[in-house]
Image: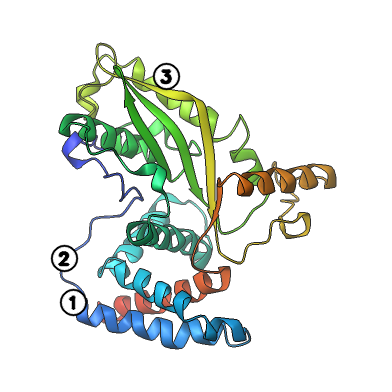
Amino acid sequence: MAEPFTPEQAITQKNLWDKPPVKSGILERRKFGGLMDRLVDVNLRDVNARDPEYGQDKELIRRQRRILHQLSPNIIEELHGHLQAAHNEQWHEFNEKLMLKGEVFERLLEAEDQLYDLFPETIRPEEETEDKQRVGETILGLMQNPGRFGFDDMDSLSNPDLFSIRFEGDSYIIETSIEAKTHLDGRTRHQLSDMGFRRAINIILDKINSLEDSSKHGLDGLGIGGHAIRLSDKYKQSITVPRNTQITPNSIGRSFGTKYAMNNEQTDRFSRDLQEMESQGLLKKACFSNEDIGAITDFFLDEINKLVEAQK
């Protein structure tokens, strides 16, 4: 069983994605900035060479540069640790680039949110007390990664990347879940259904609200005799996709050969559902395209390989 987190170790609201422990000071900020400038000026320009509008969009390039500079200067080591953890957890071979691409996209969204408030619904009101903020942050960390609090049996549940939570009476209310998606397919459709994220969240809430020994899991103030956590009656699900994602039946993966496979009718309906989410502001588009994210992932993989070679 994983060591439970204490409240003080809980993941903060604007830093929810799981990061392995890293050494500090591996890359100086100036050196890191140079790396990110090279990534923008060489790699991203190369991958967008056939798109004349990209080179002319100075604001987009400036925004991408700022976001990349906002990333942790230790991101190479952090992503290396992420891959190592994945290898330790997987019993079979997997595509490292595919594994890393999703993580990279989440890191980019986190940085974009910090700079441009991509997810305003996650901002906590200033009038909340420090204790409420602490418990709220603990809940956010718990929902994103229950295994880190000692609930290994719930670690396989499909949980979103981010949540918005408010305090009401004696309860914490989960209002919105947010998921980063580089590709829309049958699995996405399942996650957004009642049997997906909503079901996983309710399983976790039932477990936490019935705890008699919440302090053993670093969850002081929750469980029996503490604050309850509830899913809002108006709970909403939000997803964020790359900026060039098309919301059409032909652009959605059918997931053939899997339990998430969709027929034509289901795909058409899912496309309409996504278009409706976009019209309501529940489907957002990030600053980076799918090709951008792929190029950034390749860049980081090359840097990881250099790091590994240097450590031999």
Q: Residue furthest top?
A: 225
Whether residue 6 appears in this view of the structure is: no
Work out whether 88 lies above or below 190.
Answer: below
Number of other residues with Cα within 10 Å of mark 2, as a class: few under 14, some 14 to 19, many 20 or more? few
Check residue 206 in the rendering and tell me which mark sits there, or answer none.
3
Percent x, y of residue 252: 71, 55
Q: Amino acid at mark 2?
A: Ser
Left or right: residue 218 compared with residue 62:
left
Q: Quadrant of the C terminus?
A: bottom left
State the SS at label 2: loop
In three-dimensional space, the C-alpha distance between marks 2 and 3, rounded to whole angstroms, equals 38 Å
Check residue 24 in the rendering and tell me which mark sits there, or answer none.
2
Percent x, y of residue 232: 46, 25
Work out whether 38 lies above or below 130.
Answer: below
Q: Earlier in the sequence, mark 2 or mark 3?
A: 2
- Which residue is under mark 1? 28
State the SS at label 3: helix
In three-dimensional space, the C-alpha distance between marks 3 and 1, rounded to whole angstroms, equals 45 Å
Left or right: residue 140 compared with residue 53:
left
Q: Return the residue nearer the eye: 234 or 178.
A: 234
Q: Residue at x 23, y 35 (%)?
A: 133
